[in-house]
Image (cartoon, grey):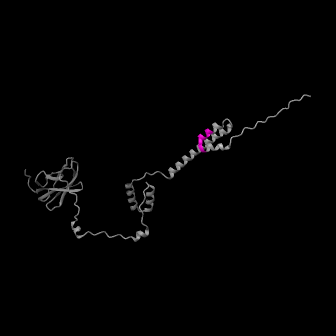
């Protein structure tokens, strides 16, 4: 019996699976690491290569979402305040010193603009401190000091009043004309007619035109006593009181002379 050849069995070794340490590449390097993992492992373990891409995308989205949430919370909890200059800080500190609630104002000062508040004295210190007496001026200084002068009217401004006649009969109309020169605007004025005793018989207010001129009319009663009368004009302008007067004579029981 002829010898028959024996069948030989050959066993191929199973392909070695890539190490799971590859998942660290997309974890640390994001999408770039996922692409590298996919390109290296797509021929040996395509499923693992796809998982690496998916893992890198998920991690990137999660990290981006966390960054957005943290940024929004930072803005809401700690809003941005601009850095104040030294002059602005000094003004802010002065407001704190005058505040009725210094501790609350101090916390606001630290939060707004990064100013460092001036140290506030404690309650014990504030009660212990007594105001130091202000220095008294010497006799030479007191005699040298003079009060500041009140504002003086400008030299180019004048207020005048005149009447259309120097004498009138009782019952006639007195027509004073007021000129407020140098102001170049309308101005409120008041004109009082005063009898020989200084009592105001009649009073009127008016407004000059833009050139400063105003004309008024007064009807004197027929019972007005004879004597020297005054037409007094007053006005307030530029922080000063202005006044002037004109004198006329009143007669009774005669026809007016021309």
Q: Is residue 30 magenta-colored?
A: yes
Total number of numbered labels? Answer: 0
Q: Which residues are magenta?
A: 28-36
Question: Percent x, y for residue 61?
Answer: 59, 43
Q: Main secondary structure of the magenta part?
A: helix
In the displayed structure, does residue 166 sit left or right of residue 56?
left
Question: Percent x, y for residue 107?
Answer: 45, 59
* Residue 173 in sight from this viewpoint: no
- Which one is in front, 77 or 243? 77
**Residue furthest toward the right?**
1
Question: Percent x, y for residue 63?
Answer: 58, 45
In the displayed structure, does residue 39 sit left or right of residue 120?
right
**Residue furthest toward the left?**
257
Residue under the image location 44 percent in, 60 percent down: 106
Question: Percent x, y for residue 95?
Answer: 39, 59
Q: Is residue 248 magenta-colored?
A: no
């Amino acid at each position: 019996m002829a010898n028959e050849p024996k069948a030989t069995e050959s066993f191929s070794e199973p392909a070695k699976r890539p190490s799971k340490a590859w998942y660290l590449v997309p974890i640390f390097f994001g999408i770039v690491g996922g692409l590298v993992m996919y390109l290296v492992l797509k021929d040996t373990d395509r499923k693992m290569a796809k998982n690496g891409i998916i893992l890198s995308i998920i991690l990137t989205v999660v990290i981006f979402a966390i960054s957005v949430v943290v940024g929004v919370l930072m803005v809401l909890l700690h809003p941005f305040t601009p850095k104040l200059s030294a002059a602005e800080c000094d003004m802010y500190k002065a407001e704190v010193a005058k505040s009725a609630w210094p501790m609350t104002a101090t916390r606001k000062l630290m939060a707004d603009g990064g100013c460092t508040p001036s140290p506030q004295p404690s309650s014990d210190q504030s009660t212990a401190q007594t105001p130091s007496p202000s220095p008294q001026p010497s006799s030479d200084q007191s005699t040298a000091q003079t009060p500041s002068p009140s504002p003086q009217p400008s030299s180019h401004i004048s207020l005048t009043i005149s009447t259309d006649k120097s004498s009138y009969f009782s019952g006639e109309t007195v027509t004073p004309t007021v000129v407020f020169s140098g102001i170049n605007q309308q101005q409120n004025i008041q004109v009082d007619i005063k009898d020989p005793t200084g009592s105001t018989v009649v009073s009127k207010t008016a407004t000059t035109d833009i050139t400063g001129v105003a004309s008024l009319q007064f009807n004197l009663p027929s019972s007005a006593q004879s004597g020297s009368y005054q037409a007094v004009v007053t006005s307030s302008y530029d922080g000063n009181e202005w006044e002037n007067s004109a004198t006329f004579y009143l007669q009774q029981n005669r026809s007016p002379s021309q």
